[in-house]
Amino acid sequence: MKTNSKGIPMINIKKLAVLTASLAALAGCARTAAPDTAADATAARAVNVAWYKAYNAGDGAAVAALYAEDAALNAPGAPVARGKPAISEYYVKNAAASAAAGLALVDDPSSDVGVSGDLAWQSGTFKVTDKSGAAVDAGKYLTVFQRKDGKWMIIRDTWNSDASPAAAAPAPK
């Protein structure tokens, strides 16, 4: 190994550059602070709160605004609505009809919310009440959210009723 005039070993510039680049790469791979999943869960839950508020107000356009452009809606008794235009069409009709009939959807506040990176889900139960507040239906739902440009958007939504399906009409003779 070469030394300088004082007997101190001289470091090869190439080796120093490789060492510096390696340390920089390792620093870039270092773990960052853990994401705040509690804040993300609260933000995802807030989307569902906004959904219920808009739906019960009969504002289908505001409901549809909570969905991503490529979302899919799996409503009971209806074909899959794919994409925001189809979802908007569904809710503009459905939310207004529900509000006009005096029906309201009520979310169970103890629903489950989970977060993993830029995906979140919420599952829970709901009930449908009439003008007097009496329950006319109940069911369960599963909503999947994705963080897009820093905002949680619904990307998949499905629900169903706990009521038994209506009996099939007898076949004509």
Image: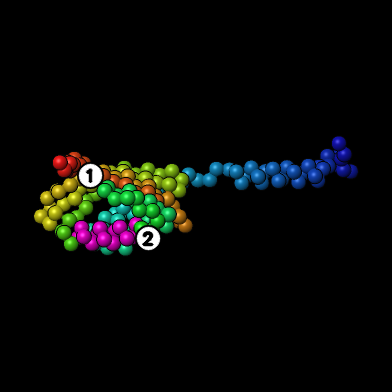
At horizontal 39% and vertical 46% (from top left) the residue drawn is: 120
Identify which residue, 5 or 108, lies in the foreground.
108
Is residue 173 in view from this perspective?
Answer: yes
Please indicate whether residue 10 sits to the left or right of residue 136 in the image: right
Mark 1 burial class by Cα count in 10 Å: few <14, some 14-19, many 20+: some
Please indicate whether residue 107 sits to the left or right of residue 114 in the image: left
Q: Position of residue 170 (x, y in %)?
A: 15, 41
At horizontal 58% and vertical 43% (from top left) the residue drawn is: 30
At horizontal 87% and vertical 43% (from top left) the residue drawn is: 4
- Spatial distance from mark 2 to mark 1, Cα to Cα? 25 Å
Q: Quadrant of the N terminus?
A: top right
Q: Is residue 58 above or below residue 31?
A: below
Mark 2 burial class by Cα count in 10 Å: few <14, some 14-19, many 20+: some
Secondary structure mostly seen in magenta is helix
Mark 1: amino acid: Ser
- Quadrant location of residue 26? top right
Q: Position of residue 90 (x, y in %)?
A: 30, 57
Mark 2: amino acid: Pro
At horizontal 38% and vertical 58% (from top left) the residue drawn is: 84
Q: Residue furthest right?
A: 5
Circle 2: element type: helix
Q: Position of residue 165 (x, y in %)?
A: 20, 42
Q: Are marks 2 and 1 in contact (CB under 8 Å)?
A: no
Mark 2 or mark 1, earlier in chain = 2
Is residue 53 in view from this perspective?
Answer: no
Label 2, on which residue?
85
Label 1, on which residue?
161
Q: Is residue 153 magenta?
A: no
Say which mark, if any, is on residue 8: none
- Stretch of the chain drawn in magenta: 87-99
